[in-house]
């Protein structure tokens, strides 16, 4: 029996996934979580074969959770199932140790088949997304540029960002200016939007 932990913040979607997977004779959902932090705790507690994670979850997102699970429960394979098929997300998920990346509009039978393939040691990636990720190229933003853009997303001032990230205001301005240039944006609001659309943040 393949043991699966489901992490999805929308209860209805999580319930539907659990029901669909429960129909499979060789798959058992042994735990559920609504945040990345909960997912990590459940995985460490029940030690499943597969952790099926959404990306956009509160407290800890799915990509961060994937990295933690890969490190702290190396016997568990991580699959990302998301609404957001953004090229940058795929790249970041793979770097975090995920072995599969699928979008939620895939047919249910494909998900069950993907779980079996991942357990057999394969990587499973949505083909359209793989092509988009290759054409989009790598994330041009450095870790610090991503941090600063991320902090700027809620409209924080330069001073607020500097205090939150323990940087000088001048350093924050430099990182923002560099990020604006790399995203070919006119200002930081547009830079945040472009980076989010690509899945770079």
Image (cartoon, rainbow, N blue to C red):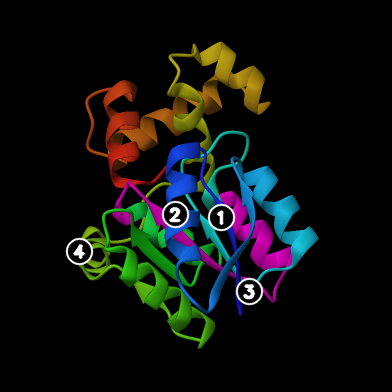
Q: Is residue 92 above or below residue 152?
A: below
Residue position marked by numbered label 3 in the rendering: 49
In the rendered view of the protein, which quadrant contains the N terminus? bottom right
Residue at 20 percent across and 65 percent down: it is 128
* Mark 3 burial class by Cα count in 10 Å: few <14, some 14-19, many 20+: many
- Direction right: furthest residue: 45
Q: CA distance from mark 4 to mark 3?
A: 32 Å
Are the residues tagged 2 and 1 within 8 Å (C-beta)? yes
Residue 4 point in image, percent of width and height: 59, 66
Q: Nearer the viewer, residue 144 or 109?
A: 109
Q: CA distance from mark 1 to mark 4?
A: 31 Å
Residue position marked by numbered label 4 in the rendering: 135
On the picture, is 43 further left or further right than 115? right
Q: CA distance from mark 3 to mark 2?
A: 17 Å
1 or 4: tag closer to the N-terminus = 1
**Mark 3 residue element:** loop
Residue position marked by numbered label 1 in the rendering: 6
The image quarter containing residue 135 is bottom left
Q: Is residue 81 above or below residue 180?
A: below
Q: Start and end of the magenta stretch? A: 64-87
On the picture, is 9 further left or further right than 193? right
2 or 4: tag closer to the N-terminus = 2
* In front: label 1 or label 4: 1
Are the residues tagged 1 and 3 within 8 Å (C-beta)? no
Q: Nearer the viewer, residue 10 or 155?
A: 10
Q: CA distance from mark 1 to mark 3?
A: 11 Å
* Mark 1 burial class by Cα count in 10 Å: few <14, some 14-19, many 20+: many
Residue position marked by numbered label 2 in the rendering: 17
């Amino acid at each position: 029996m393949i043991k699966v932990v489901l992490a999805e913040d929308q209860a209805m979607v999580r319930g539907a996934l659990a029901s669909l997977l429960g129909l499979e004779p060789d798959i058992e959902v042994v735990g559920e979580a609504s945040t990345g932090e909960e997912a990590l705790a459940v995985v460490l507690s029940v030690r499943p074969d597969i952790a099926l994670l959404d990306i956009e979850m509160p407290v800890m997102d799915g990509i961060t959770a994937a990295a933690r699970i890969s490190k702290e429960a190396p016997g568990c394979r991580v699959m990302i199932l998301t609404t957001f098929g953004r090229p940058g997300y795929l790249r970041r998920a793979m770097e975090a140790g995920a072995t599969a990346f699928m979008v939620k509009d895939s047919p249910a039978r494909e998900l069950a088949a993907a779980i079996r393939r991942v357990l057999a040691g394969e990587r499973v990636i949505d083909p359209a997304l793989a092509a988009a990720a290759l054409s989009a190229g790598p994330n041009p933003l450095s870790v610090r540029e991503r941090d600063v853009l991320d902090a700027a997303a809620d409209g924080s001032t330069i001073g607020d960002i500097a205090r939150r990230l323990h940087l000088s205001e001048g350093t924050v301005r430099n990182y923002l200016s560099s990020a604006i240039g790399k995203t070919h944006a006119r200002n930081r609001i547009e830079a945040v939007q472009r980076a989010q659309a690509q899945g770079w943040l």
